[in-house]
């Protein structure tokens, strides 16, 4: 992708390749959130990306965004046109960080002072944030969290992987609820996929750590309240690994409420591969998985569903 300012991506001997996420608002304005050194910025384009505005800096004090292929700033548009941005700020220790958030109510010209969304105050991993807006306007932030691993380590208890936490906002990102744990034992280092049901329930899809060290995927509808939520397993490749794949999945929900899934696995039974499947009962059962691409070369899937159709890229 081209740099918002027009500079091309460069080789490893030059400046780093930009880490950018984009979205359009209802007026066709394109927003690009980018990790730039010790800052997070947002630029806008009113001509479909031919030219961009000067970047607006969201981080008044320098902070190091955790930015690579699986972790990058996110930008979405709120129900009333708010420009919402989240990112992970690196901590001092390796694999630690905080989930940060800022919003604009004037079309991206100015932003609120960044706030930290994880509320535990621990210098542990809070990473791989995912940001979305439901049909009813509720803003959901989800991330991979190591607070339970830290607690278990301090008591000598066993704990595998990390956990998935969320916080929500009913006022366009003005305030957020207390953090809520969705599930223990997620993979520590893969992005989360997020979509919303027609009733605005957040649906999350991620690589889980299942019994026996299997790292296959689960889907969870995060229903309201504090009651535990059920997870449904998607895919049965039985990939046993202690490594960090850095290959997050993709999720899209069609207007018909069909769930579309795409994911990567490195299971011994399949070799490196990306699979696609769909479900018409919220993940309880899925269609037979379809393998995509050439063996060993496919990865990093992405899905978009609209009334016009479904797009799948990898």
Image (cartoon, helix red, strand yellow):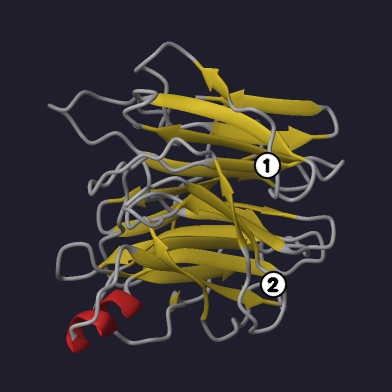
Outermost residue to the top: 294
Q: Nearer the viewer, residue 54 or 165?
A: 165
Would residue 269 be seen by someone viewing this image from the given angle? yes
Secondary element type, mark 1: strand
Image spot of residue 129 (x, y percent): 45, 60
Vertical placement of residue 189 versus 86, above or below: above
Image spot of residue 177 (x, y percent): 60, 84
Secondary element type, mark 2: loop
Q: Residues within 10 Å of mark 1 (few under 14, many from 20)?
A: many
Residue 252: which numbered mark, if any? 1
Quadrant where the N terminus is found in the figure: top left
Would residue 107 be seen by someone viewing this image from the given angle? no
Q: Nearer the viewer, residue 304 or 227?
A: 227
Q: Quadrant of residue 171?
A: bottom right
Image spot of residue 246 (x, y percent): 33, 42
Image spot of residue 189 (x, y percent): 33, 53
Vertical placement of residue 53 versus 128, above or below: above
Whether residue 103 sits left or right of residue 273 in the image: it is right
Vertical placement of residue 96 versus 245, above or below: below
Outermost residue to the front: 212
Residue 172: which numbered mark, if any? 2
């Amino acid at each position: 992708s081209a740099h918002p300012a027009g500079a091309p991506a460069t080789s490893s001997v030059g400046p780093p390749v930009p880490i950018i996420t984009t979205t359009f608002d209802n007026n066709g304005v394109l927003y690009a959130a980018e990790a730039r050194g010790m800052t997070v910025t947002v630029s806008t384009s009113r001509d479909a990306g031919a030219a961009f505005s000067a970047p607006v800096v969201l981080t008044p004090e320098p902070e190091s965004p955790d930015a690579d292929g699986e972790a990058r700033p996110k930008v979405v548009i709120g129900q009333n046109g708010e420009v919402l941005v989240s990112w992970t700020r690196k901590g001092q220790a390796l694999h630690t960080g905080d989930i940060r958030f800022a919003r604009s109510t004037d079309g991206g010209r100015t932003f609120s002072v960044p706030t930290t969304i994880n509320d535990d105050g621990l210098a542990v991993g809070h990473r791989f944030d995912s940001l979305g807006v439901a049909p009813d306007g509720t803003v959901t932030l989800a991330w991979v969290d190591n607070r339970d691993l830290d607690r278990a380590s301090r008591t000598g208890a066993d704990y595998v992987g990390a956990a998935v936490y969320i916080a929500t906002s009913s006022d366009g990102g003005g305030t957020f609820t207390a953090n809520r744990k969705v599930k223990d034992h997620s993979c520590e280092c893969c992005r989360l996929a997020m979509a919303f049901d027609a009733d605005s329930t957040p649906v999350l899809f991620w690589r889980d750590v299942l019994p026996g060290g299997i790292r296959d995927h689960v889907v969870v509808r995060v229903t309201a309240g504090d009651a535990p939520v059920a997870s449904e397993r998607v895919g049965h490749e039985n990939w046993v690994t202690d490594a960090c794949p850095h290959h997050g999945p993709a999720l899209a929900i069609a207007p018909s409420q069909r769930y579309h899934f795409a994911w990567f696995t490195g299971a011994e039974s399949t070799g490196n591969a990306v699979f696609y499947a769909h479900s018409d009962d919220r993940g309880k059962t899925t269609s037979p998985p379809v393998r995509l691409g050439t063996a060993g070369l496919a990865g990093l899937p992405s899905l978009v569903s609209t009334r016009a159709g479904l797009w799948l890229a990898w």
